[in-house]
């Protein structure tokens, strides 16, 4: 039988699960006092503990023991996406990117964007659920909605952007360098305007292709995440 996994960002500073995680433990999984649980801090560590009491709506744990620790990765993926009109598609993208492993998901508004606001809380809950399911150890930072021009002038890291052009530019695996912190832009389904693309190039963002097919925004985001993991898999 698998051991139940919970998200506990303040695992060393508290002896209680959050109210939401406690509800899941008591009402959904029906865990009892004395049962072993695993706790993820979202910053690279997994702990083992035992439920020692159930006080009202809160689960208390004790016997905290570090059982797995992942060092700071040699590469990081920071994904920037223009959100789609249907927020469910962004939730699906967040879920899959967290399952693969990602360090940041950030949303921005550009000229052809379909959505001008996002609900970060829903996306954060989706990310936590995917973290527990996949048993990855890093929970990504999720931010937005940023202004496109502020993203375009960012400094540092390896800056890449998905670009639809004819003839096509080189594919991601030939543009990205192994072992970097990647900041990757995926535009709206109407794509970047020519002015936006030129601004990115002027600020040293490198264009790349994801192949011959025109992908949906959320599919492109997942493809970028997986592609960079494959690039660094050796």
Image (cartoon, rainbow, N blue to C red):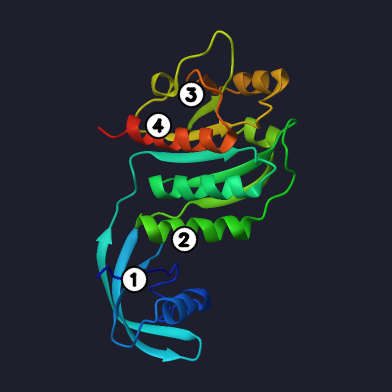
Give the residue at mark 3. Answer: 210
Q: Residues within 10 Å of mark 4 (few under 14, many from 20)?
A: some
Residue at the image point whose x is 58% and y is 9% from the top:
166
Q: Is residue 26 left or right of residue 86?
A: left
Q: Position of residue 3 (x, y in %)?
A: 29, 70
> Which label number is shown at residue 227?
4
Q: Residues within 10 Å of mark 2 (few under 14, many from 20)?
A: some
Q: Position of residue 189 (x, y in %)?
A: 65, 30
Q: Residues within 10 Å of mark 3 (few under 14, many from 20)?
A: many
Number of numbered markers: 4
Residue at the image point whose x is 40% and y is 31% from the top:
227
- Of the numbered discs 1 and 2, the one sitting upstream in the chain is 1
Distance Cα–Cα, label 3 vs label 1: 37 Å
- Of the numbered discs 2 and 4, the one sitting upstream in the chain is 2
SS type, badge 4: helix
Q: Nearer the viewer, mark 1 or mark 4?
A: 1
Does the CB distance between marks 4 and 3 fall below 8 Å? Answer: yes
> Which label number is shown at residue 4?
1
Distance Cα–Cα, label 4 vs label 3: 9 Å
Q: Is residue 159 above or below residue 34?
A: above
């Amino acid at each position: 039988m698998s051991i139940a996994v919970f998200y506990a960002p303040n695992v060393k500073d508290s002896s209680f699960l959050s109210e939401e995680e406690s509800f899941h433990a008591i009402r959904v999984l029906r865990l009892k006092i004395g049962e072993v649980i695993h706790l993820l801090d979202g910053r690279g560590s997994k702990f083992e503990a035992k439920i020692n009491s159930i006080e009202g709506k809160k689960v208390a744990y004790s016997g905290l023991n570090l059982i797995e620790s992942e060092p700071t990765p040699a590469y990081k993926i920071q994904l920037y996406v223009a959100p789609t009109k249907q927020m469910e598609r962004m939730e699906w993208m967040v879920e899959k990117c967290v399952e693969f492993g990602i360090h940041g998901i950030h949303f921005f508004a550009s000229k052809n964007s379909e959505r001008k606001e996002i609900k970060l809380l829903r996306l954060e809950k989706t990310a936590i659920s995917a973290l527990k399911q996949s048993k990855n150890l890093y929970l990504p930072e999720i931010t937005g909605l940023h202004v496109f021009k502020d993203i375009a002038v960012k400094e540092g890291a390896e800056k890449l952007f998905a670009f639809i052009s004819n003839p096509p530019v080189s594919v991601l695996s030939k543009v990205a360098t192994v072992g970097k912190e990647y900041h990757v832009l995926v535009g709206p389904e109407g794509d970047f305007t020519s002015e936006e693309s030129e601004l990115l190039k002027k600020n040293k963002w490198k264009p790349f292709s994801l192949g011959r097919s025109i992908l949906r925004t959320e599919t492109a985001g997942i493809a970028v995440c997986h592609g960079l993991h494959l690039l660094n898999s050796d």
